[in-house]
Image (cartoon, rainbow, N blue to C red):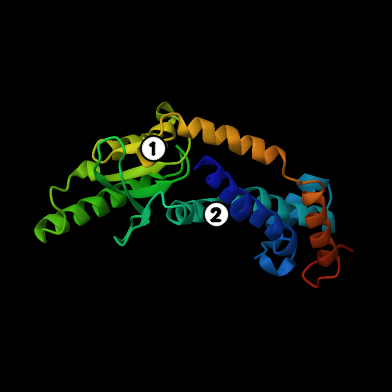
Amino acid sequence: MIQNIVKYFEEQIFQNHIEASLKVHSRLKSYNINPIVVKYLSKVLEDKYSPEGVAKALYYPRVLGTSINTSFGTRIQNMFVQLGLAEGSLIKGMDIEFFDKVDQRKKWCQLKSGPNTINSEDVNPLIRKFTNTINLARTNSAFKDIRNADFIVGVLYGEADELSMHYKKIDKTHPVYIGEDFWYRLTGYMGFYNKLVKELHSSINEINTKDLISKGCESLANEIKTSPLFDFS
């Protein structure tokens, strides 16, 4: 199971990110540009307004932040379904459904990446969504013996003591399972999370990322040099 997950990460997350970094994010047309901010950031990065500085200001946050974080969340949800660890949920707002290997009850789960990946304004709508779904299910007798604890938040990585206050507020009504606890309930294997992280680290060490950033950034800078959007004279 761990090897299947590692392979999925390699092919669907890491390799896709590398290809997008070189073929998509290195193209100027993939950006919506704030001319004032990008000029300032170029000055911060290169101490001058230059094609190289603009390229870095655009490319670095996209490749090292937005791109990988967006694909991570989307593809992880698909991974659980494709590898048979869970089913996709038909209930609006839920990502996956699975049978909890600890209490043997079916769980409807909204997935989150890490212990700080939720904002204060998201808390009450999430709780309200859970509550409304449970009330509707009880009214329609759709699910037998449904409980608040059957609707959960699954946080992929981290420790319980790292959970933000927003998650802790949710946890008072609906369980928030994080890291080792979440993966144990999902797979039924104690220590699965730590072993998975170790194997992923080993896999990452073997990935060829030589000159990845410099190649993508150079390609973008060359396009910026000839673009009418910029004047470096």
**Vertical placement of 33 versus 162: above or below?**
below
**Residue 46 picture location, percent across and down:** 82, 47
Which kind of residue does numbered mark 1 sit on? Phe
**Coordinates of residue 18 in the picture (x, y in percent):** 70, 54
| Residue 102 appearing in the image | yes
**Does residue 95 show up?**
no
Residue at the image position 26 percent from the left and 54 percent from the top: 129
Residue 16, horizontal then vertical, whole percent: 64, 57
Q: Which tag, 2 or 1, sits closer to the chain's start?
A: 2
Specify the quadrant that holds the C terminus.
bottom right
Graded by Cα atoms within 10 Å as few (under 14), some (14 to 19) or many (20 or more), the crowding at tag 1 reads: many
88 left or right of 134 in image: right
- The residue at which mark 2 appears reads as 70
Residue ranking furthest to the top = 161
Which of these two is toward me, 208 or 110? Answer: 208
* Disc 2: CA contacts within 10 A as few (<14), some (14-19) or many (>=20): few
Q: Position of residue 36 (x, y in %)?
A: 70, 59
Q: Residue at x 38, y 43 (%)?
A: 154
Q: In the displayed structure, would residue 128 be above or below residue 205?
A: below
Q: Which residue is mark 1?
A: 182
Badge 2 element: helix
Viewer-nearest residue: 223 or 199 = 199
Element type where label 1 sits in the image:
helix
